[in-house]
Image (cartoon, rainbow, N blue to C red):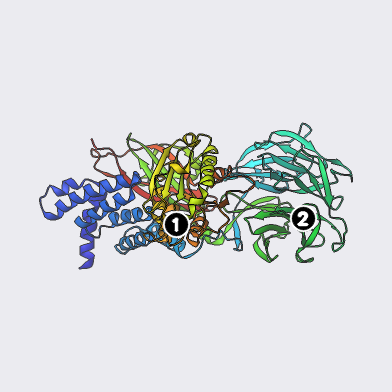
Amino acid sequence: MKKIIFVFIAFIFSAFAQTNLQDTASTGNSRSANSGFAEEEFRRGVQSYYRGSFNESILEFEKALSYLPGEPLVLDWLGKAYYRAGIEGAALQQWNYAKEAGYGGLLLQNRIEIVSDRRVTDYDYGFTQRFTESGSYPNVNGSNLIYSQPVSSLSNHDGSIWVVSYGTNELLQFDVNGTVVRRNKGPINGFDRPMDVIRLKNGNLAVSESAGDRISILSENGSFIKYFGARGRGQGQLVGPQYLAEDDFGNIYATDFGNARVVVFDAEGNGLLHFGEKTEGFDGFKSPTGIAVCGGRIFVADSVKGGIYEFDKAGNFLGVLVNDGTFSRPESLKQWGSDYLLLTDRNKVYAVELSSGAVFENAITGKGKSLITSAVSDRNGNIIVTDFKANEIYVMSKMTELVGGFFVQFERVISDNFPEVIVEVRVENRKRQPVVGLKQQNFLITEGKKPVEDFVLLGEANNNDFADIAILIDRSLSMNKYEEQLSGAVRELAASMDGKGQVSIISAGKVPVTEFSGNPSQLSDFSAKALKNSYTENPALDLAVRLSANGLVNAEKKRGIIYLSAGDSENTFTQYALSDLTAYLNNNAISFSTVLLSQASPSEEISYITRNTNGTSYYIYRPEGLGTVIKDIVDIPSGLYQFRYTSSFATEYGRKYLPVEIETYLLNRSGRDETGYFAPLQ
């Protein structure tokens, strides 16, 4: 009996989903009338959802369900609306109802699994997890040589990578698909056995040349600027430079293989000092290779001694991070996150914890003919590995993500100019990390399983160079002492936006208030005394966060909240759970950063939101000021893509629900999503 009832409901709603319910409603029975009312509410709900009015869409979908209880398509959409509103528990409940009704198949099941997993695990990007090969970039194309003896690589903001080709004396740029988009030969006389490449703080690139005994400086696009260093044993001289690093002051460090030392240059290329000779407590390098600068400390690996050693910026030996003999032949050493180093050793990649020196094996090539000389984390959370002997470039991904694939989500469908349709799609891994750098070839959009016409990729939000910002101001009683600091912080933040994007100011008082919304240039004379919201003992911070986020949902594709506080607000989260607030921010790609006006620590609640939304905590009197706060928000990766195509569907005067699907492919990973929309009424 239950099966018969379900088949009947599915039949009724197939008309809802694929045709026009008005045909059914005209029969005059109550079921058909309810279908017609449900159709109207469903249509409004879909339109509200695409406008970013998620609370309104929830109400519309619930009204639709009141007319047609248990309708799977409406349940699916209600779950989507709850998800974007940050109420993930309710979203999962609705999706499970739809799943139990036989709706959605593997696609819905995968969505439920990913969202459930995100709710019960932290946002760890897996520094100690196992990685395995998810793809590789071939060194030949037919009879044409692409590269030879890759020795090191560097990740770029757009998802591409630079690779140093030792054998062909080149610097090559690959996109995420392994296609060469740029080749660079270096100076007029060419590179002379290039070894390593790093990005300097000014955006330029530095390349060490082991046979040329010099370091070349290139623009961010790879155009040659100058080189410095010369062969010899004196100050600023080199014999076979290998790996490079830079400190916070722009000084460049090079491991000098021939002289068994580290040579330090200033930002202009003048030799400052060298270190690594035998001193008290340190018996000197035998064969220095990888080098990394982390928090003012310099770490150097020795390929003969098999350990990692720690020095200060003056070259004084501080101690041993990893004991001699731990590694067989360590090569590259790169900082990974804030707490780890990424090290290569023959055919293995290790993570080394900075605080303890603990060593974790991340990956192994499993090939006999192998010498991994470099491993770096790319923009998409993979590890890019260069194998000098095997002559290969590997893309290593977490094993769990390789099995699970991508999490692909339609965020918006714009059909105002139907049959022209614009869709916005977000691509992430299973741990919310955006997937950037994808090209049109990585996507397939279909209508009713048939490829759409005139399909074109319009753009990628990751390439946007500005953001919309909501400045959230704590109005607790303690902030009364920091009005001058607050005024200066707002002015500095607004000035650093360079007139780009929009900024709003929300004051978190007993009732949150939007104090300002407009161009950041209008805040050049901002004063805290102009705020209308009074100081209070109990600021409604959770409501203020929600209000700030509401104003950003339909803002620029890069957006963030900056919370200004003295750091001691407590008991201000009473209406919304932290998990729901964090989910609301994450599910709408809104970061939450904190600027502390005092040296007090932020509350646990604020620390939690900041930590779990790609945000950063800053102190107002940091040496570099607040000028980089906006840049840090802009630099957060975004996996949002926008496409345009021409629909071939008949709309039945705008009343027909039109389905659309998308599939995303990259190397051996994929993901897909389905949605639908309505054309304008005619």
Q: Quadrant of residue 677?
A: top left
Pick whichever, 123 or 646, lies toward us: 123
Q: What residue is shown at x 77% (from left), y 55% (from top)?
A: 312
Q: Is residue 450 left or right of residue 269?
A: left
Q: Mark 2 and mark 1: span between their CA atoms? A: 39 Å
Among numbered discs 2 and 1, the one appearing first in the sequence: 2
Q: Is residue 359 above or below residue 44?
A: below
Question: Which quadrant of the rendered structure holds the C terminus?
Answer: top left
Residue 482 picture location, percent across and down: 52, 49
Q: Secondary structure at mark 2?
A: loop
Pick whichever, 266 or 123, lies toward us: 266
Residue type (three-letter) at the residue carrying disc 1? Thr
Q: Is residue 244 left or right of residue 464?
A: right
Q: Is residue 604 above or below residue 518?
A: below
Dot label at residue 537: none
Question: Which quadrant of the rendered structure holds the N terminus?
Answer: bottom left
Residue 533 visible in this rendered orientation of the protein: yes
Q: Is residue 100 above or below residue 586?
A: below
Residue found farthest to the left:
28
Residue 592 visible in this rendered orientation of the protein: no
Q: Quadrant of residue 437?
A: top right
Q: Is residue 187 above or below residue 510?
A: above
Q: Secondary structure at mark 1?
A: helix
Residue 384 picture location, percent across and down: 64, 52
Residue found farthest to the top:
188
- How many residues crowd mark 2 within 10 Å: few (<14), some (14–19), many (20+)? some
Find disc 2 in the rendering and name its residue: 312
Q: From the viewer's perspective, is the residue at label 2 or at label 1 nearer?
A: 2
Find disc 1 in the rendering and name its residue: 582
Residue found farthest to the front:
481
